[in-house]
Image: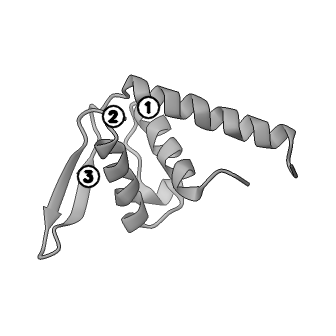
Amino acid sequence: MNIKRNEAIIYLILKYIEQKEESKFREIGTSKKVFYAALEEIHKADWATNITFKRSGLLNRIKSAVVTGSRLTQSSRYFITDFERKVASEDSHPNI
């Protein structure tokens, strides 16, 4: 399978944002650390607007993230389309 787990997590988070729903790491089936890392990647790649992080501690770790009111950017829509195309391609050619 050519689809990476991180890509799948990012895709799911973007789909939640697209539906204007607050995503939770438990709903996506990942750890809080991986979830926040994916949100941070989405934020850095400018795939969604209005993502806010609350950080604390010596290592400045993310303690919470808010995506309420967030919107997808055009580049995230390309990511979603590309990801869905990969999934469809792998579904039609499972062992290639």
- 3 or 2: tag closer to the N-terminus: 2
Q: Residue at x 41, y 58 (%)?
A: 35
Question: The disc labelled 2 sits on which kind of residue?
Answer: Ala
CB of mark 1 within 8 Å of CB of mark 3?
no
Left-right relation of 26 to 45: right
Tell me which numbered mark, 2 or 1, is placed earlier along the sequence.
Answer: 2
Label 2 Cα neighbours within 10 Å, binned few <14 / some 14-19 / many ≥20: many
Q: For this view, does 84 lie left or right of residue 61?
A: right
Q: Which residue is mark 1?
A: 76
Of residues 74 and 63, the one drawn nearer to the viewer in this rendering: 74
Q: Secondary structure at mark 1?
A: helix
State yes or no: discs 2 and 1 in contact (Cβ < 8 Å): yes
Residue 4 position within the rendered picture, expressed as x and y whole percent measured from the top left: 60, 55
Q: Quadrant of the N terminus?
A: bottom right
What whole-number distance in Å separates the C-alpha atoms at marks 1 and 3? Answer: 19 Å
Q: Quadrant of residue 37?
A: bottom left
The extreme top residue here reads 74
The reply, left or right, for residue 93 in relation to residue 40 is right
> In the drawing, what numbered circle is on residue 65?
3
**For residue 48, which numbered disc appears in the image?**
2
Q: Residues within 10 Å of mark 1 (few under 14, many from 20)?
A: many
